[in-house]
Image (cartoon, grey):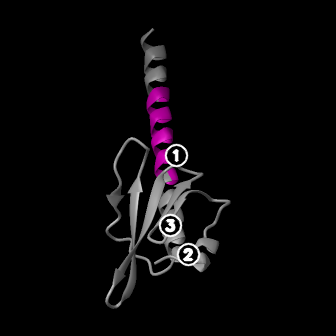
Amino acid sequence: MFDQNDFKQIDKEYFQVLTQTGYHIILKSKNTEHTWDIYCQEQNRGRSLVINHKHNDAEPFHVRRKYHPKTVEEAQNRIMKHDKWFLKGQELAKQKREEMMNHYDSDSDTNS
């Protein structure tokens, strides 16, 4: 179960806190606007955190199977790494689109 110490670890500069209960901390990344549900499961050997993720409000959460951090701080670090990876991919896709458009524009100029 999450407690006040867990809630204090949340980086409110990076995340918008949507929900904060004993078993769920739901955050929205201010960088990607992805929503993350950090779910606290109680097990015989202690608590286990599971991170669920969605790209927008219209879609359901999906489990990040590789993301099972031990602390809220570790969960945030993993989310921030995912954001960095996602934003880099977005930038590369944008560059590729621009290159394709430039190529198309230069082909159009030579055919005129």
Q: Nearer the viewer, residue 86 or 105?
A: 86
Choose the circle earlier in sequence order: 2 or 3. Answer: 3
Mark 3 lies on a secondary structure that is loop
Residue 86: percent from left, percent from top: 47, 54
Task: Tell me, yes or no, whether the highlighted magenta stretch contains residue 100.
Answer: yes
The residue identified by callout 2 is 73
Q: Amino acid at mark 1?
A: Glu
Residue 91: numbered disc:
1
Q: Amino acid at mark 2?
A: Glu
Residue 21: numbered disc:
3
Q: Amino acid at mark 3?
A: Thr
Residue 105: percent from left, percent from top: 48, 21
Above-or-below relation of 111 to 35: above
Q: Nearer the viewer, residue 87 or 102?
A: 87
The C terminus - image quarter: top left
Q: CA distance from mark 2 to mark 1?
A: 27 Å
Above-or-below relation of 69 to 107: below
Residue at point 54%, 70% (across, down): 77
Mark 2 lies on a secondary structure that is helix
> Image quadrant of residue 13?
bottom right
Q: CA distance from mark 2 to mark 3?
A: 16 Å
